Image (spheres, grey):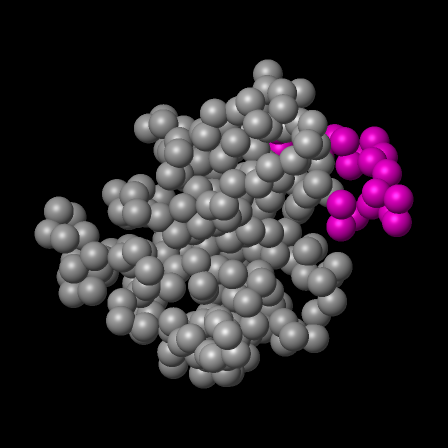
Amino acid sequence: MKGEAMISIKNARLGYKKSGAEISVLKNIGLDFYAGDVIGIVGLNGVGKSTLLKTLCGLLPPLDGEVRIEGELMTQIALSELAKKVAIVLTEKIGGFNLTTFDVVAAGQMPYTNSFNRLEKKHKEIIKAAIEVCGLKEHQFKLINELSDGLFQKTIIAKALAQQTPILLLDEPSAFLDYASKHDLFLLLKKLAIKENKCVLVSSHDLDLLLKYCSKLLVIEEKLAHLISVDEAKTDAAFLRIGGGFI
């Protein structure tokens, strides 16, 4: 029997505001996500996958309804505490003057440092472990502007791992990775969910990888979303439409 949901969404309408007007992207959302699951988010471009993830990490407030993280209303969680609960990997590329791979990964430990953001030995050990898990040891002192798209993506994933949150959100993390690295990433996500009891949500167009490594799929179509088991995917009409008949 599952315990309390790590993420709970009730009667929610999700979207954003533009020029003072509300733009609805998803509606009537009621979902629960639990520790130990890797949930693949699928849908055509523009259906709201990124909007959902940005809402779950606090970047976008829900237009209506409520979002709870470990039972607590997200709107009542201080940003400093939310950073210890939820980590997100977005597709947008960041820049920075003289930032190295190590610097970016180290930022994941900032919620746990003092007001001067001083890294102690315990922080550096966690950063080192995240760098090694993501295969970045030989690149840790390179400037991020010198990294390939694939290495940069691994760096951002390593930062999220260093953040040590029970909830991990990833938006198209395999987009710039080579074939072997894609599988390595999903193997890592599955390991984190099972062995460290994390709740992992990952959006991707790599449907074959989602079917292979995820425990559940969140299918988004026409502003609505429904959760299915991986075993149900090949009989789910919306999923089959997203696959375009190639699944």
Q: Does 125 appear in magenta?
A: yes
Q: Main secondary structure of the magenta part?
A: helix
Q: Is residue 68 above or below residue 143?
A: below
148 or 80, which lies in front? 148
Q: Name the residue furthest left.
A: 245
Q: Is residue 75 left or right of residue 243?
A: right
95 or 132, which lies in front? 95
Count of numbered badges drawn on the protein: 0
Q: Is residue 208 above or below residue 8?
A: above
Where does the image place residue 79, in percent across and percent down from the top left?
71, 62
Whether residue 28 appears in this view of the structure is yes
Question: Residue at coordinates 14% horizontally, 53% vertically from top-left?
Answer: 244
Q: Is residue 40 left or right of residue 93?
A: left
Where does the image place residue 98, in percent across and percent down from the top left?
69, 27
Question: Residue at coordinates 52% horizontally, 31% vertically from top-left?
Answer: 152
Q: Is residue 130 above or below residue 76?
A: above
Res 141 quadrant in image: top right
Question: Residue at coordinates 46% horizontally, 30% vertically from top-left?
Answer: 149
Q: Name the residue furthest top.
A: 138
Magenta segment boundaries in residue numbering: 110-131
Where does the image place residue 74, in percent across and percent down from the top left?
63, 72
Whether residue 140 appears in this view of the structure is no
19 or 217, which lies in front? 19
Q: Is residue 141 above or below residue 90?
A: above
Where does the image place residue 126, in percent across and percent down from the top left?
71, 35
Q: Is residue 170 left or right of residue 143?
A: left
Q: Does 134 appear in magenta?
A: no
Question: Residue at coordinates 35% horizontally, 48% vertically from top-left?
Answer: 204
